[in-house]
Image (cartoon, rainbow, N blue to C red):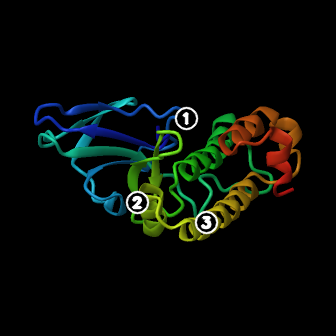
Amino acid sequence: MAKTIRQYTGDGVRTVYPVDFELGYISEEHIYVYTGYHTEFEQQLTYSWVDEYSIELDEPVENGTELYIRRVVPRDAAVNDYEDTAILRESELDDSFLQALMICEELSDGLLDIHGTGEIVQDPSNGNSIVVFDQTYTREVIDGKDAETLADSKQYTDDRVNNSLTYILSLLGRDGVYGSNTVMFQAFGAVIGEDASTAFERVY
């Protein structure tokens, strides 16, 4: 199951939907509600917040139409920009670490490029739903026709994941990070399939 996208099928009646991501969200601005292509997620439906855990559409989605609720956190800037001598508040530090973990979840969902030509497909190896953004890779995973093309695409994907992980960990800083945030690195390592110390040493 994708961790950063929720998928529903409209029935022409329902208008209230949950916003139930396991890690929550940092800002309402990071939540996108849309139909159609994932490349056009910023073209949102009109909705309002019922409470912090649910939204209500102004108009129900047509019967049979797929509705997506997606969390997209910034990748080009930290949510909090700390300066020397600044007072560090717990909530702001939590949000900074959450940003990194949420980007990890996007990567684990296959969202290497937030504006890619993605689609949700079923991984034939284990039956899990995954989001794949490289069209060649998607086609070869589904049809299983060209192992060489698939291998090339996998290497390309692995390289991009590693580059993205390097950036994510650079957001966390080095001094005192591992010792004072072991639990956070355990959670981060779980996302990428490594233990906490290995996740830390990936960059540091």
* Position in image of residue 58 (x %, y %): 16, 41
Closest to the observer, 9 or 121: 121
Q: Say whether residue 60 is left or right of residue 204.
A: left
Q: Is residue 21 above or below residue 79?
A: above
Q: Which residue is mark 3?
A: 151
Q: Which residue is mark 1?
A: 23
- Residue 23: name its quadrant: top right
* Position in image of residue 178 (x %, y %): 85, 42
The answer to which of marks 2 and 3 sits earlier in the sequence is 2
Q: Which residue is mark 2?
A: 118
Under circle 3, the secondary element is helix
The answer to which of marks 1 and 3 sits earlier in the sequence is 1
Residue type, label 3: Ala
Residue at the location (47% across, 59% down)? 144
Residue at the location (50% across, 64% down)? 113
Residue type, label 1: Leu
